[in-house]
Image (cartoon, grey):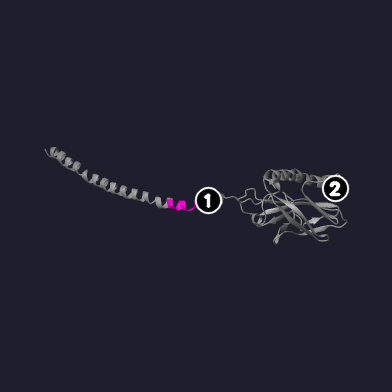
Amino acid sequence: MSSSLRRGALAAVAIAFPLASLAACGAGSNAQTLEVKPDNAETKVGDIKVQNALVITQPDIHATGPAVVAAAIFNNGASPQTVDSITLPNNQSAQLKPAKGKSKLVVPAHGSLVIGGKGNASAVLPNGREAVQDGSVRKVTFTLSSSGAVSLQAFVVPADNYFSKWGPSSIPTSTPTNTASKTPKPGKSATGTATPTGTPTGTATGTGSSANTPNSSATPTDATSASATPSGR
């Protein structure tokens, strides 16, 4: 795929994905009634439908750090289901964390679950940069308590522009590394500060000269003796 076509595909995904969360709120689990075929990953197994699945990496291609899986999961069944695991090839397993106040990633009956984004459940791939490459498509498998494995192909995109609010919450930078490499410099500065130590030594020498100056003030003592001679007269 050429870079221009890839950018076009990612742009299409970028437009579709933010709309997914709105569709989840406005259309409920029966979002397919909109009769719109999104230009991004979706699949359906039994009562479960996974839509807008993405793997979102660090915004800087040279940065190391986690990636995340983002998706909207709909449950058209009468019973709730839990998301037990999210995996990629080569035994890459996401670390699942429910939304605040929840104990599990639950897809309610006739409801939906959004994974990714502030305040939602999260699925983190600790070694994201090693596992996926921006612009590629990777198989992602969602395993649910009743429906079992639900697999689909998901785009891999960096967490910038449209995807910044869905990306990893931990964004490491290269700045700490550079700072660490500059750490020895203060040590060198400390070595250089030994130079002022020589300055006090010179000052001490000058002080010694000053100490001799008061001794030469004994001359006025002789002058006093001379003035005492007129007194003797």
Farthest right residue? 78
What residue does disc 1 label?
A: 179
Residue 136 point in image, percent of width and height: 69, 51
Q: Nearer the viewer, residue 114 or 139?
A: 139
Q: Residues within 10 Å of mark 1 (few under 14, many from 20)?
A: few
Does residue 114 appear in the picture of this structure?
A: no
- Kindly report the secondary structure that dominates the magenta region of the rendered protein: helix
Relative horizontal placement of residue 225, taking residue 64 as reference (left or right): left
Relative horizontal placement of residue 116, taking residue 233 as reference (left or right): right
From mark 1 to mark 2, how far is it between C-alphas? 52 Å
Report the residue at 19% width, 42% height from top.
219
What residue does disc 2 label?
A: 32
Q: Secondary structure at mark 1?
A: helix
Residue 122 point in image, percent of width and height: 72, 54
Pick the quarter of the image with the C terminus. Answer: top left
Does residue 10 appear in the picture of this structure?
A: yes
Residue 26 point in image, percent of width and height: 83, 44
Q: Are marks 1 and 2 in contact (CB under 8 Å)?
A: no
Farthest left residue? 233
Q: Nearer the viewer, mark 1 or mark 2?
A: 2
Earlier-in-chain disc, 1 versus 2: 2
Amino acid beneath label 1: Thr
Q: Is residue 187 magenta?
A: yes
Q: Secondary structure at mark 2?
A: helix
142 up-or-down from 38: above or below: below
Residue 192 point in image, percent of width and height: 40, 50
Give the residues in magenta: 181-188
Relative horizontal placement of residue 32, taking residue 196 as reference (left or right): right
Q: Nearer the viewer, residue 8 or 72?
A: 8
Q: Is residue 197 magenta?
A: no
Amino acid beneath label 2: Gln
